């Protein structure tokens, strides 16, 4: 999906909601465990209930890879079920030497046909560049994350700046706002405006809203640009809104509530 197509979807739906399909077999409603593929059955119901309100789905591949071949099959069925006009993210956090990154890119852009994949940039430009060679595809590079351990490296002062600022500035020059996004944690409220200052035109994938304590108003106030420029990811607060037989209805209601919060800012 191109940048202009993504912006068009955002404007049409008045939403920057990304629903995270971080589907844990131990957390889905018990009645689904009798299904042939419980993970896909859960995801299918969640997608049906939330697709009206979301412009993106993020599949955290770890939850699928951990189940071996069955997990990959569940992931592929889920990806195929997502409507073609909704932006898809493989949250895989790949990044390695160039020829290995090329194979990772082929995995998620050709074999699986995701629109984007998250990338860990620690190994530098040659580990990121292969992901940027696919037309209409995106690399979503870790910028500043919302986990406690982000202070161990990302926030270290290097030549007068936090290390994550060096990463944002360097990676911005490797591609363009047409094929690079950045992961920016919503719980780092004091840094949201600074990140937008450093990268005025790039899209941000913003996790941390909902269960991790971030909120829509703070994120939108500090990061929206003329093209919206953000995807706010919510996972647990939507997909696990209920653990009962009404789980899909509850997820749909939660997604609608988040989307309605976004309307006034868009």
Image (cartoon, rainbow, N blue to C red):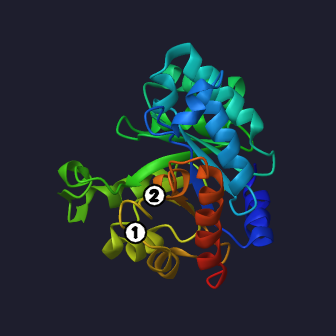
Is any part of residue 108 visible from this angle?
no
User: Which residue is disc 2 drawn over?
Assistant: 207
User: Which residue is disc 1 drawn over?
Assistant: 214
Is any part of residue 213 visible from this angle?
yes
The location of residue 108, given as percent across then percent down, is 63, 30
**Frontmost residue, 167 versus 16:** 16
Between the C-alphas of marks 2 and 1, the distance is 8 Å
Identify the residue at the far top of this view: 69
The structure residue drawn at horizontal position 66% and vertical position 80%, both measured from the top left corner, is 263
Query: Is the residue 120 above or below the residue 19 in the image?
Result: above
**Frontmost residue, 91 versus 109:** 91
Which image quarter: residue 12? Answer: bottom right
Which image quarter: residue 37? Answer: top right
Mark 1 residue crowding within 10 angstroms, few (<14) / some (14–19) / many (20+): many
Say which label, 2 or 1, has the lower sequence index: 2
The location of residue 132, given as percent across then percent down, is 61, 40
Q: Are marks 2 and 1 in contact (CB under 8 Å)?
A: yes
């Amino acid at each position: 999906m191109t940048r202009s197509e993504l912006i068009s979807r955002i404007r049409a739906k008045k939403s920057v909601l990304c629903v995270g399909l971080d589907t844990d077999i131990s957390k889905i409603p018990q009645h689904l465990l009798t299904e042939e593929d419980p993970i896909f059955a859960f995801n299918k119901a969640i997608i049906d209930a939330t697709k009206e309100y979301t412009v993106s789905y993020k599949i955290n591949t770890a939850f699928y890879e951990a189940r071996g071949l069955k997990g990959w099959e569940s992931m592929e069925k889920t990806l195929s079920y997502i409507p073609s006009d909704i932006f898809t993210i493989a949250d895989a956090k790949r990044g390695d030497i160039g020829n290995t990154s090329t194979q990772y890119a082929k995995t998620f852009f050709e074999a699986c046909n995701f629109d984007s994949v998250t990338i860990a940039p620690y190994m530098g430009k040659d580990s990121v560049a292969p992901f940027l060679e696919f037309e209409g595809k995106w690399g979503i590079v870790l910028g500043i994350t919302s986990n406690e351990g982000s202070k161990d490296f990302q926030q270290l002062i290097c030549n007068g700046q936090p290390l994550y600022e060096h990463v944002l500035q360097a990676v911005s020059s490797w591609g363009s706002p047409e094929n690079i996004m950045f992961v920016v944690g919503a719980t780092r409220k004091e840094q949201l405006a600074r990140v937008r200052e450093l990268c005025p035109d790039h899209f941000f994938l913003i996790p941390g809203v909902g269960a991790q304590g971030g909120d829509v108003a703070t994120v939108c106030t500090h990061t929206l640009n003329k093209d919206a420029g953000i995807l706010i990811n919510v996972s647990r607060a939507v997909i696990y809104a209920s653990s009962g037989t009404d789980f899909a209805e509850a997820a749909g209601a939660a997604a609608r509530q988040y989307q309605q919060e976004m309307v006034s800012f868009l």
